[in-house]
Amino acid sequence: MGFDIEKWYTQKMQGEVLLRYMGEISSEKITEALGEIELSLNLKNEKNKVRKKVYNVFVESIQNLFHHVDIPPATAKVQNIPRFGVIILARDRSFYRISTGNFVQAERVQILRDRIDQVNSLSDEELRTVYRDILGNEGASLKGGGGLGILDIVRKTGNKLEYAMYPHDEDFVFFAMDVYIS
Amino acid sequence: METIIREGSPKTPYVRLDSEKGLIEIKGRSIPENSVEFYKPLIDWLDKYGSTPQDNTSVNVQLEYFNTSSSKCILDIFKKLELLYKKGSKVHINWYYEEDDEDMFEAGEDYQSIINIPFTMIELEE
């Protein structure tokens, strides 16, 4: 029982998939994935502006996984590795979609939900103000970003984050997020 | 004082910290997972440079991409330079961005709003 990750993964394969990855989100894997999408975005002869935006948002999304994922539950049918995550980059009609997925401990779910809902509620002007406040006033966190990742994604795409929390068991939830770049 | 030159890599920028010329350059992409590790030696260098700076310090930042993890570190660099400027040294930052890169332009505006140093935004034609 538990969350059916394979089914979810298959459902996320709509459109033209430029990159899909399920496994350990290590620094080396990130470098590899970035090299791969850079090539494919170049091959698409995409406008410089769009290419850079997709690349930038992909970097933030995959590094968000790198910094924040929890170890998956032993009952999940996935590799039992500390930094398990999923990332998919697809092109669907006029937009690019970056889908990410990872297991989150149930006790952290509310914090995560509140954080995203709060960022989603901000206007463009408020996003800029909050971003500058965090950048200018708070010391760098150990992870370096000081919680700017999600703000940066919403600011750059101009689109709200779409997310879903799928219960796995009492202790874990699978957190799935879609970012659209038009 | 030593000059630091770092060649660019897929995730880290080309950096030149030249105490003789009073020149600081950061170019390329800055997207490492651990930015603090990369920038710490550069910030330490600026601390030393601050004790015997040149009359004029020019700073050229020409980034193609940078992640939010680097954005804090870049601000730390600018804050060190702001200290220098407040002590009476001439410091000037040139922030380069490609003409259609509104995100890099806005990032320059973000820094400009936070730090108090002469700051010029320079548009590069594609």
Image: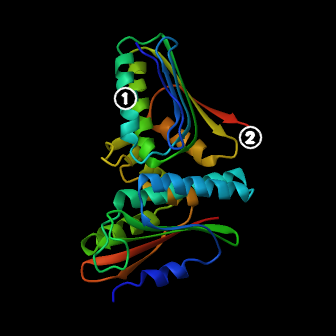
Residue bearing the label numbered 1? B41
Q: Secondary structure at mark 1?
A: helix
Extreme residue toward the front, this view:
A79
Three-letter amino acid code at the position of disc 1: Pro
Question: Horizontally, is A54 left or right of A71 in the view?
Answer: right
Note whether A104 is above or below A125 in the view shown: below
Residue A145 pos. (x, y %): 39, 48
Note whether A71 is above or below B98 in the view shown: below
The numbered mark at residue B126 is 2
Note whether A35 is above or below B110 in the view shown: below
Are there few (<14), some (14-19), or many (20+) residues within 10 Å of tag 2? few
Quarter of the picture containing the N terminus of chain A is: bottom left
Q: Residue at x 33, y 43 (%)?
A: A140
Front one among A85 and B92: A85
Q: Chain letter of disc 1?
A: B
Three-letter amino acid code at the position of disc 2: Glu
Residue A182 pos. (x, y %): 65, 64
The numbered mark at residue A163 is none
Q: Residue at x 70, y 42 (%)?
A: B99
Q: Residue at x 65, y 75 (%)?
A: A15
Q: Quadrant of residue A151?
A: bottom left
Q: Residue at x 70, y 69 (%)?
A: A94
Does residue A127 appear anywhere in the picture?
no
Q: Nearer the viewer, mark 2 or mark 1?
A: 1
